[in-house]
Amino acid sequence: MKKFKSLGLVTAALFTASIALTACGTGTKSASTPAPSAAATAAATTAASSAPKAEKVTITIGAYSILKDSFDVILPKFKEEWKKKTGQTVEFQESYVASGSQATAIIQGFEADIAPLSLEGDIQKIVEKGLITHDWKNNPYKGNITASIAAIGVREGNPKGIKDWTDLTKPGVEVLIPNPSTSGGAKWDINAIYGAGLKTSEAAGKKDPAFAKDYLAKVYKNIKVLDKSGADSLATFDKGVGDAIVTYENELISRIQSGKKYVEVIPQYTTTIENPVALIDKNVDKHGNREAVQAFLEYLWSPDAQKVFADKGFRSVLPEVAKQYEKNYTTPAGVFNIEYLGGWDKVNKELYGKGAIWETILAEGGAK
């Protein structure tokens, strides 16, 4: 298998914009009621299918920032397919911001019908608020629509000689990474570095959390900017700031396709990345557009959509599509997943919780 050698919005204001955007949506308001049974849902779907369709249906997407390039291609494809199948025109209202900020916006009232986010924890926050009432992971892909790995992007020629995470700790090396308080992608990035510390200590004889914390803290000392999202971090790197960026592999591949003169560095130890999606039951029921939203959700696992994701550098979750693109990727022998770190519940508590590892590192290293 070969490696790609060269490669080359969030805040209250955005939330307000998102709320304004949903005001244009279709559907009627309904009083809050208990979640329907499976039989009732099926009956409602059947009734909706047999009823005359409106000429137009609106689907509101609340997505994490990195997906915009892929959705720019996927949405027109689905609109065409749905029009041929039903005669109905789909209008999309779209919001792309950092995953954590998007989840917060949805919880606070942004009426997204579907939420493709960066990590499971952000979907679970919406579940805990009662907006998602079905088992969103009950499918062959556990709710994930894309996969990737955490990697390092450097400038053409790799002038700082960066080959692994430890090289990001060298004097004079400026590192970019998004802020995990707003960006789901940043959590994957930090998981990768912290997990690499665990792997390194384990290879030396003992899996040592203290060693892993120190490993991560040394990288943090060289972080130049903590942007709000992965997209913002990449935009900063594109402006010439920083020597290295920690990001999703697919984003580096996307940069190559746009002509950026970057080099991808795949560390010896890094994490797999899984990006989930969920239909927001409460909003869909309010808008009366479940049939179209469900169809769009399912379309994201179709070969057509998965090929778009793969063309943009993601690793497909559909086995037959992944097989077609496997020569484009290198998977290091030391790759690990979220289970290696104990699962998201443990990670969110011990790595990102109040007074936990990341907060301690911030306090000891100074705010960026």
Image (spheres, rainbow, N blue to C red):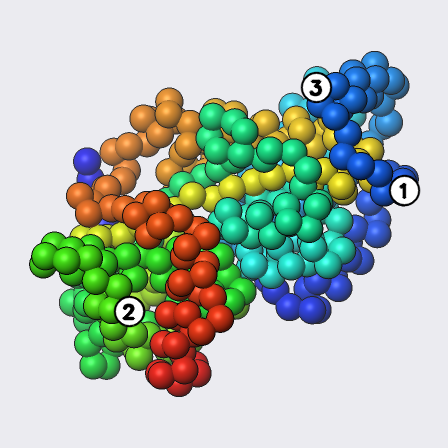
**Viewer-nearest residue: 91 or 229:** 229
Q: Which of marks 1 and 3 is in front?
A: 1
The residue labelled by disc 2 is: 213
Q: Which residue is drawn at 46% across and 30% down?
A: 141
Q: Which residue is drawn at 41% across and 82% down?
A: 363
**Residue type (three-letter) at the residue carrying disc 1:** Ala
Residue 21 horizontal side relative to residue 315, left or right: right
Q: Which of marks 3 and 2 is nearer the N terminus?
A: 3
Q: Check contact, mark 1 vs mark 2: CB within 8 A.
A: no
Screen quadrant of the C terminus: bottom left
Q: Residue 197, how many percent across, how many down?
A: 23, 62
As displayed, is residue 98 above or below residue 241?
A: above
Q: Residue 216 carries which label?
A: none
Report how far apart the C-alphas of labels 1 and 3 lie in the structure. 34 Å
Q: Residue 31 carries which label?
A: 1
Report how far apart the C-alphas of labels 3 and 2 lie in the structure. 54 Å
Secondary element at tag 1: loop
**Residue type (three-letter) at the residue carrying disc 2:** Lys
Q: Check contact, mark 1 vs mark 3: CB within 8 A.
A: no
Q: Residue 324, how many percent across, how many down?
A: 33, 26
Please indicate, yes or no, whether residue 304 appears anywhere in the rendered image.
no
Number of numbered labels in the structure image: 3
Q: Nearer the viewer, mark 3 or mark 2?
A: 2
As displayed, is residue 253 above or below residue 311?
A: below
Residue 48 horizontal side relative to residue 330, left or right: right
Q: Residue 84 carries which label?
A: 3
Within 10 Å of disc 2 (Cα), the crowding (few <14, some 14-19, many 20+) is: many
As displayed, is residue 17 above or below residue 114?
A: below
